[in-house]
Amino acid sequence: MYYVGVDVGGTNLKAGVVDEQGRIISKVDCPTQVERGHEAVVENMAHLALKAIEKAGITLDDVKSIGVGIPGVLDPRTGRVPFCTNLGWHDVPVIQLMQKVIDKPIYVDNDATVATLAENVAGVSAGAKSSVFLTLGTGVGGGVVIDGKVYSGAHGVGSELGHMITVAGGEKCTCGNRGCWERYASATALIRMGTEAAKKHPESILNKAENISAKTVIDAAKAGDKAALEVFDEYTEHLAVGLVNIINFIDPEIIAIGGGVSAAGEFLVKPVREKLAKKVFYKAMPYARVELATLGNDAGIIGAAMLGR
Ligand SMILES: [Zn+2]
């Protein structure tokens, strides 16, 4: 049997056929065209899923289910999306609308949950009974897998890891609180810290960049720029603080790190591992491995497909 995964983004829709092991058999994409309204977008999603099936050389009969990953708040049980800023959606019944085009079981979940599931099935956390996935991008998203299942809490809003408060009274967060972890551990945080450091250190090569991005800071740190290295050290310290909270709290087998900042590779995870070793509670016991996520952009398709497995 095969599974179809649909990855819904604000700019593009991607769909793919995935086998039992989480391997992608075919992949197609098209523009989301948010401006055409939610009914047209959901219809596009269904047609794209059918196109992926055709491209894989199989038929709808070979497909067990279709899964959809959505960048917003939703109720996986009903398939309703009450709110999605990226898509401008309010109260959209995704499953119902999609089933008008495709008569198959359809599952929907949040994109971070979907990526967590993908890494747990086919990525770096494959086979782990417990794992945590983190994506370091505009914010810090992620998910928790316990006993092989993504844990989303009693009310479906669980594992908002980016909004655990790690600095009381700290930077203001988009959620209204202060000091959320994502204010210190996201790409946005790296940009803020890099921009502040550039102002303070006119000699820093950070000042050569027209717009400071997370990559600017990482590249400058890799090149040995003192100001950038200080920023990066502070960043990995904040990252390690959140990770040690997760380890002390959940004790997962593995923590996989993805998202834009993870492109820094070993340069990122090496100092984080060193800082963790000093901070974990049970120093004499084994604790979570911290690894780079391996599926990258394919995680959206694979994880969505695996919702029906
Ligand atoms: Zn927050």
Image: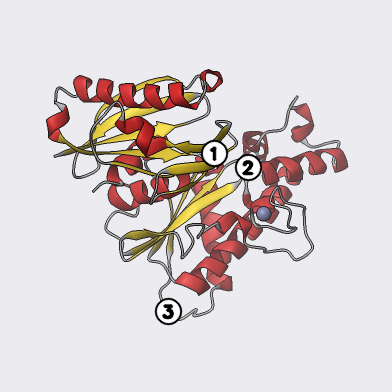
Looking at the rendered image, the quarter that the N terminus falls into is top left
* Residue situated in front as seen by the camera: 63 or 76: 76
Determine the image quadrant of residue 286. Answer: bottom left
* Residue situated in front as seen by the camera: 230 or 53: 53
* Residue situated in front as seen by the camera: 94 or 271: 94
Instruction: Tell me the number on the disc at residue 285.
Output: 3
Taking the spot 79% from the left edge, 37% from the top edge, the residue there is 204
SS for dot 1:
helix
Position in image of residue 77 (x %, y %): 38, 51
Position in image of residue 242 (x %, y %): 59, 62
Tag 1: residue type? Gly
SS for dot 2:
helix
Taking the spot 63% from the left edge, 40% from the top edge, the residue there is 218
Q: Is residue 296 visible?
A: no
Answer yes or no: disc 1 within 8 Å of ligand 1.
Answer: no
Q: Which residue is mark 1?
A: 260
Alpha-carbon neighbours of circle 1 within 10 Å: few (<14), some, or many (≥20)? some
Tag 2: residue type? Ala
**C-beta proximity under 8 Å, tags 1 and 3:** no
- Left or right, 177 with reference to 119: right
Determine the image quadrant of residue 296. Answer: top left
Alpha-carbon neighbours of circle 3 within 10 Å: few (<14), some, or many (≥20)? few
Determine the image quadrant of residue 244. Answer: bottom right
Q: CA distance from mark 1 to mark 3?
A: 31 Å
Point out the tag, 2 or 3, that comes first from the N-terminus: 2
Tag 3: residue type? Met
**C-beta proximity under 8 Å, tags 1 and 2:** yes
Position in image of residue 233 (x %, y %): 67, 54
Q: Which residue is mark 2?
A: 187
Answer yes or no: disc 3 within 8 Å of ligand 1.
Answer: no
* Residue situated in front as seen by the camera: 141 or 206: 141
